[in-house]
Image (cartoon, rainbow, N blue to C red):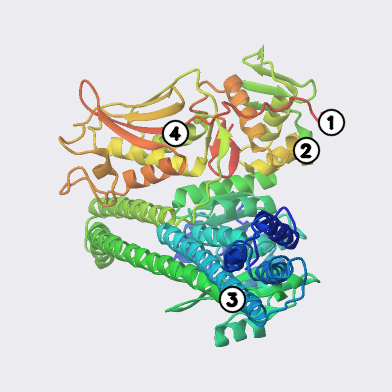
Amino acid sequence: MPMPTLPYNPYLFVLLVSVAVTLLMLPISDPSFLPNSALLYVLLVVLIGSALGRRPAILAALCSALLYAHVFVPPRFSLAITEGHYLLSAAIMLTVALLVGHLTASLKHTARQMKAQESRTRALYELARKLAATLTREDIERSTAQFLQAEIPNCTLRVLEPDAGDSLVPPLPASLLEALKQRQQTLRTSHGQPGQTRLLVPMLAASGLHGILVCDLPTPQAEAGLDLERLESIASLAAVALERTHFADAAHQSEMRHSTEVLRNSILSALSHDLRTPLTGLIGIAETLCRGRIAPEQQTSLLTTLHTQALHINRQVGNLLDMARLRSGQVELSKAWQPAEEVLGVILQQAQTQWPARSITVTLAADLPPLYYDAVLMERALWNLLENAVKYSPPDQPIEIHVRREASHALLSVCDRGRGLPQGIDIDALCSMFRRGEPESNIPGMGLGLAIARTIARAHAGDILASNRPGGGACFTLRIPLAPADSPPAPSDVLPCAL
Amino acid sequence: MNTSDTILLVEDDAQIRKFVCIALASEGYAVHEACSAGQAASLAASLRPALLILDLGLPDRDGQHFIQDLRAWSSTPILVLSARSQESDKVKALDAGADDFLTKPFGVSELLARVRALLRRRQQPPLDAAPVIQFGEFRIDCVRRIVTRRGEPVHLTQIEYRLLVFLAANPGRVFTHRQLLLQVWGGHAVDNHQYLRVYVGHLRQKIEANPAQPQHILTEIGVGYRFQP
């Protein structure tokens, strides 16, 4: 343990104090004070021992003995000791001073060591407490690194995943990694920068290796005696925390798997009902046609039904595939600046083909800037809203599409004159998969349309809103934020070359 | 109709092959089938078909590479068949040199309409024989660079004019964003899709009766634009 550094030389200080004490006692020439002066010297040694440590105490003891013999033992001011018992008392004084000085200094040293030990233990406890509160691997790695940075100065620290030896420069040899796993103790290598020693501390917990603590530090410092045991205990604290996050992740995963399982079951039951029914129709019609004993007009009508049913199945499958792709997270948005008309035009074109008799009107606010969206996905979302409006309102009622701006959002609403939303049902319920406003309805569908529309809206940082209209009917609104910069950079109208 | 038109159908699914063959044959085309890219390449070389209908999901080769290789020696029009979720594949195929695409499932009437359009275009004389393009109420005089609607001049900027002429000269044909940018702005602009969208928007304002419901410049969502006279 290093002594607290003094602003002066402790040995010089000892000499000065000894001389000062001697000068103080000098006026007392009474020979009966002689034992007291010896005791005073011993006291001085004790004080110096407790304040400055062992070596100054020894110096003080020698000094005191000399001064005592020289100044106080008769004949005074001479080192000559004429009487035997004076010699004995001087020797005893020296011995006692040395012994007491030594004992005091060791006691002091031990106390200091205990204190340091305690503060280190407290620090370790603080780290453990901090680690217990962290939730992610990154946080654990950061806390550990911070702690060790304070603990071991000059140390360049990294926390590696158990199998990420390649991410180091230079990469960790596989043999070293293997040795680390086998021997489960800290290894020193001279890999890395010249003049640097690399310490590899395995982060071990009950379930095995959770990472490797890599500490690069200057070779002299590494050889000057590092508390490896402490390093290892820090590593194992971090390892336990890592293990905990690992198990928490595993639990989360298994919960996810469970909810996926629930979803899969509801998909399967929806599939078996909503796809099997039209398929049964298809099979029956096809067989009837194959038997060939039907009137030509009936034949035409059956073929028309066949076509309609097949298109219906196609839509359902399309929705299912969309949902599966959106849910699997494989869809990468290819957002671009484009006017809302771009997607509306496509939808109206398709609607004209599919429902030629239906009146669909569009009102577009004039102040709408270009929007930032993925055209393909936005088309699906709006199409689903439009398809719902067509399905859930009488064929002779118009459908209105309104596009307008409201504060920092663009609102695209599809409004119908149908029965409106059922009482007491909220948008969350409507938008969940395989949920429909009216569960047993003769309107075909699986309840995926709104779920898809909402997933797409949310992928654009927006949402789907639903409300009933005054005068009857429902409005479904797709709301997406206008991006902070209102419009894209204006393209130049300058041609690179003449026409 | 030219009954000697030969069509090569490349499709690995037997059901689709069957109904497309029947539909095309009923219109009087001579249809040949191939179920892999390898077979298709040798048949294309020996038959020299007037049109190639190509499924993008072939088992033995990537459709895009097949088109690129074919384009090295043949200018036969190519109609691509693709599944709904493959917008990027369609774009790649069109950029590689395909002429049009159909999304599965498609109707027979739509298929026949595309086939007719592609075959008709092949027989059309090149543009330089007719420097005047007419569509709807519009007339483009490519020599004097004047666009008129019912005789009234329509003011277009240089880029709008160039975009309109290029689209109108290729009626019915779908162009990817990239192809249009390359044609109108040049090679440095191929990634600036918003240029194109902004100018298509301007052009629609000037030539469409209702820009939100365009009749001439149609959007092929996720792919590009198609001009309809």
Image position of A160 (left or right of A437): right
Mark 1: amino acid: Cys
Bin the neighbour count of mark 1 within 10 Å (Cα to Cα): few under 14, some 14-19, many 20 and up: few
Could you tell me how far apart the alpha carbons at marks 2 and 4 are, in whole angstroms? 33 Å
Which residue is denoted by mark 2 in the rendering? B186
Image position of A401 (left or right of A494): left
Name above or below for residue B89 compared with residue B13. Answer: above
Q: Are marks 2 and 1 in contact (CB under 8 Å)?
A: yes
Name above or below for residue B221 compared with residue A234. Answer: above
Mark 2: amino acid: Gly
Task: Find residue A319 and report its horizontal and vertical position in percent.
Answer: 37, 51
Could you tell me how far apart the alpha carbons at marks 1 and 4 are, in whole angstroms? 39 Å
Chain of the residue on which disc 1 is drawn: A
Q: Which mark is residue A480?
A: 4
Which residue is denoted by mark 1 in the rendering? A497
Q: Residue furthest top?
A: B152
Could you tell me how far apart the alpha carbons at marks 2 and 3 are, in whole angstroms? 102 Å
Q: Are marks 3 and 4 in contact (CB under 8 Å)?
A: no
Dot 3: element = helix
Is residue A4 something one can see in this rendering?
Answer: yes
Which numbered mark, 2 or 3, is in the foreground of this view? 3
Could you tell me how far apart the alpha carbons at marks 1 and 3 are, in whole angstroms? 106 Å
Which numbered mark, 2 or 4, is in the foreground of this view? 4
Q: Which mark is residue A164?
A: none
Which numbered mark, 1 or 3, is in the foreground of this view? 3
Mark 4: amino acid: Ile
